[in-house]
Image (tube, grey):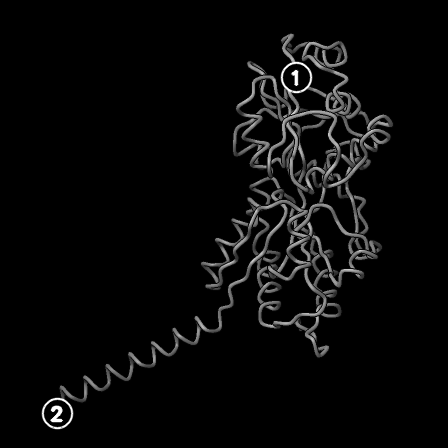
Amino acid sequence: MKFKHMKLKYLLSSVVMASAIFANSAHAVDITGAGASFPYPIYSKWAEDYKKSAGTAMNYQSIGSGGGIRQIEAKTVDFGASDAPLSKEDLDKKGLVQFPAIIGGVVLVVNLEGVAPGALRLTGLVAADIFLGKIKTWNDKAIAELNPAVKLPADPITVVRRSDGSGTTFLFTDYLSKVSGDWKTKVGAGQSVAWPEGVGGKGNEGVSAYAQRIKGSIGYVEYAYAKKNKMAHVSMKNQEGNFVQPDDLTFQAATAGADWAKAPGFFLVLTDQPGKDSWPISGASFILMQKSQENADKAAAVLKFFDYSFKNGGKAATEMDYVPMPANVVKLVQDMWKTDIKTANGQAVWK
């Protein structure tokens, strides 16, 4: 009798445990996102940490900013991501909202034998002339004058650029348009531009792979990719005339004057900012969501993920040379969540 009582007690306890596990798994809502490759390394890290903490999976496809915008418009993902912010007018037209999630920097990388990371110096004007095809060899006078201590080969320069719609391209070409009248007139800024020349790679991953493989190449990638792949980045001359190295401190310096509260729809571009330590090709990466949500649970799960990441992901971001969003900006973002992201019947998703 005692044995039967114990067996019954064990079975009841197993049922309770199984019910709890089922309830928790049923409550966990996995989410999907797609877009910019610029923030992919940190979003992957945040997803890994969040899965351990909350049991919710965040699956993110690094397909480029253009793809992210298209997918969130088509409602095939729960959120899109773009390093090229949309104007308030575009957001309203598409029925979207956006908010900044992380700040980082675009760097030029070179494949030159014997040239260490940060040893080669370039100005924005010289970089523009290289990507325009006006400067064709590494020992060109314009490069040599900036680098008297660097042994430059007479080898031809191979430009490596993006082949897909890219926020990284937007940041890079926006910067070149600000510092080079020739670039602004002939090419301009955008996620996709008519490149004068070069080999095209898909995503930051593709540009990194080509730049590593092609001797004498120069490309542009988010800094985390340069670090991860041990690629030689270039030191850049900023607006104040100082040559600076890329890291979280110089990216942060570029955001010092950013006034997010006055940016309609959080539209703010951070290239070529003033400041003696500012990295000239800095930028935020943005999350895009539908204003009117058909699935409130999914929308809430997305916001919970970014809420967790804002609160707990700063250390990981800094270690990977990204810049976490400041607390005052996070408050602005979460205030927007409460007012602008709603269910089909007008109820706030975030409370």
Q: Quadrant of residue 225?
A: top right
Q: Amino acid at mark 1?
A: Ile
In depth, the one of 326 and 155 nearer the eye is 155
Q: Residues within 10 Å of mark 1 (few under 14, many from 20)?
A: many
Horizontal side of 7 relative to 62 (left or right) equals left
Question: As displayed, is residue 269 above or below residue 5?
Answer: above
**Residue drawn at (29%, 78%) of the image:** 14
Label 1: state its secondary structure: loop
Residue under circle 2?
1
Q: Is residue 224 above or below residue 1?
A: above
Residue 151 at least partly seen = no
The residue that appears at 73% across and 21% down in the rendered structure is: 130
Label 1 sits on residue: 157
Q: Which residue shows up at 43% across the image and 76% down it?
A: 23
- Quadrant location, the N terminus: bottom left
Say what amino acid the circle numbered 2 marks. Met
**Position of 255 compared to 53: left or right?**
right
From the top left corner, tell me how far across and down residue 238 is, in percent. 78, 29
* Location of residue 163 by image quarter: top right
Rendered residue at 71%/68% (across/down): 341
N-terminal-most mark, 2 or 1: 2
Residue 158 image position (x, y, % from top left): 64, 20
Q: Nearer the viewer, mark 2 or mark 1?
A: 1
Density class for disc 2 (Cα within 10 Å; few <14, some 14-19, many ≥20) is: few
Query: Cα distance, mark 2 to mark 1?
Result: 87 Å
Measuring from the top left, give residue 13's x and y in whole percent.
29, 81
Element type where label 2 sits in the image = loop
Quarter of the image for the C terminus: give it. bottom right
